[in-house]
Image (cartoon, helix red, strand yellow):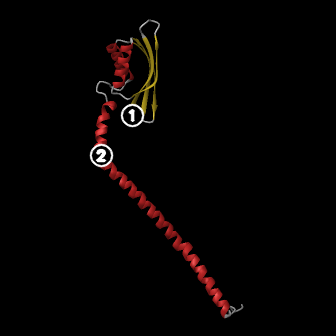
Amino acid sequence: MKPFPTLKPRERRLALVAAVFIAGWALVAWLVQPLWDRLRELHLDVRTHAEKFQAMQRLLEQAPSIERDYEQYVPYLQSPDDDGTPQSFMKGLEALSRRSSVQLNLKPHQQKPDKGVTRFEVEIELEGSQPNLLAFLDELLLVKTLITIERLRISTAPTPGLLRATLLLHRLTLQR
């Protein structure tokens, strides 16, 4: 085996500089860069947690107003005279039509469950005088139940002085 060749002073300096650069690169690549990346991730986590904490603090500060708003909408979520069934809702509509003195024809459709909400769809045909029909619609809009009116058509009836209205109504029930 040959002995390791001796290097001239200039070659030794170049080899030393190359070794320092390689060692520096290895130190940066294997130690400093991973630590720097981890530090950046930790700063991002701390910032994210601080923002979440501030958001929770704001919610806690707003808790009284949120509870007041909730209490305002509780009657729409739970009606004492309504047990949540489509039959009781239709009975309520019939009672409403009797109070308003309009003829009512109900065409219920199937219930449609959808992401925590059950939709009960009913098509309503009404016939009556203009004041009675508008009184029915006013009372319908004041009912403390979550409803949406998808379609409302009002036209004249064949009988003079009467109007005919067709509504497509959705009753929303929140599932627990």
**Who's the residue at 31% across and 28% down the image?**
79
- Mark 2 residue crowding within 10 angstroms, few (<14) / some (14–19) / many (20+): few
**Which residue does the image show at 32% across and 34% down from the upper left?**
73
Give the residue number, with chain letter if any, for mark 2.
63
Residue 35's x, y, as percent?
49, 70
Tell me: 11 left or right of 173.
right
Which sits in the foreground, 37 or 83?
37
Left or right, residue 135 beside residue 163: left
Q: Which residue is mark 1?
A: 175
Q: Relative to 57, say whether 21 is above or below.
A: below
Q: Secondary structure at mark 2?
A: helix
Q: Nearer the viewer, residue 9 or 96?
A: 96
Q: For the point 33% across and 27% down, which residue is it?
A: 144
The residue lying toward the viewer, choosing from 127 and 38, is 127
Residue 106 locus on image (x, y percent)? 42, 16
Q: Earlier in the sequence, mark 2 or mark 1?
A: 2
Q: Say few, some or many: other residues with alpha carbon within 10 Å of mark 1 (under 14 / 14 to 19 / 20 or more).
A: few
The Cα–Cα distance between marks 2 and 1, rounded to whole angstroms, is: 24 Å
Going by the numbered disc 1, the residue's amino acid type is: Gln
Please state which of the two labelled residues, at mark 2 or mark 1, is closer to the viewer.
2
Q: Image quadrant of residue 171?
A: top left
